[in-house]
Image (cartoon, helix red, strand yellow):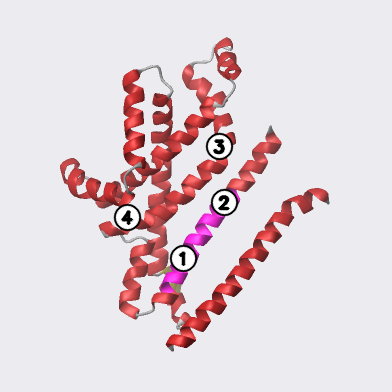
Amino acid sequence: MLRLKTIFSPVLSALLQISLLAAALYWILNSGAQAMNYQWQWDRVPDFLFFYEDGEWFPAELIEGLLVTLHISAISAIATLVIALITALLRLSNSIVGRSIATLYIELIRNTPLLVQIYLLYFVFGPFLDLDRFTTAVLALALFQGAYTAEILRSGLVNLPKGQFEACKTLGLSSFNSYRYVILPQVVRKTLPSLTNELVSLVKNSSIVSVMAIFDLTTEGRNIVSDTAMPFEIWFTVAAIYLIITLTLSGLSAWLEHRMHNAY
């Protein structure tokens, strides 16, 4: 009983806070709409999510944009982890060249806006390297988030007891197997909340790739607004979809963290 209370109390508290916030937001929006004589058209929103044709349901513009966003985010997340791990290992290596390259990359990425990086990749390096828009978007997001994620992984590696590395050597494990079976699982467990925050940031930052005319969720929302003159309904729907994604990721992270804590 106590365990159930411990698990569900934070959930109920969060739901209560969200409900109160939603009620306050609804009151503010409704009051503003009445002051502007704005007529809500929420009944038209479902048409941009799904449509029914020939006895079947098909995804409409917003859902198609959502699928593109999820596709970009998923590939970018994998690339981010690869870039971050390589960068973190270079930062901790004995090679002066490796450390310098990793430090330069991190400082360069973290001190320039993502939008500028996207423009540079798309208009400068894209034609030279023959990169399409999708690849450019994935690369830009992965490089940007990789710089931040690398510092998280580096911190996790630094804080890991040195005895873990010594134990791997004693057991005769290779460097690859040491990191695969011993080091990285512990680092991921310790840094999971921070890694989740970076994943959430990646999903939100994916909306910026709409500047390259990629038909993601944000681009589809903008096109619908220009066609229907329904800015409030569409943008609130887009925001709600992003919120559902990020809350789902946070919930999965909390569940995994709980499972890992019990496992160890």
Confirm or deny contact between disc 4 and disc 3 (CB under 8 A).
no
Q: Residues within 10 Å of mark 1 (few under 14, many from 20)?
A: some
- Which residue appears at 51% of the width and 41% of the height? 195
Quick check: is 239 in the magenta stretch? yes
- Secondary structure, mark 4, is helix
Q: Residues within 10 Å of mark 4 (few under 14, many from 20)?
A: many
- Secondary structure, mark 2, is helix
Residue type indicated by callout 3: Thr
Left or right of 21 in this view: 240:
left
- Say whether disc 4 or disc 3 marks the residue closer to the N-terminus: 3
Confirm or deny contact between disc 1 and disc 4 (CB under 8 A).
no
Q: Main secondary structure of the magenta part?
A: helix
Residue type indicated by callout 1: Ala
**Where does label 4 land, which residue?**
209
- Mark 1 and mark 3: span between their CA atoms? 28 Å
Residue type indicated by callout 2: Ser
- Which residue appears at 44% of the width and 89% of the height? 37
- Say whether disc 1 or disc 3 marks the residue closer to the N-terminus: 3
Quick check: is 43 in the magenta stretch? no
**Where does label 1 land, which residue?**
239
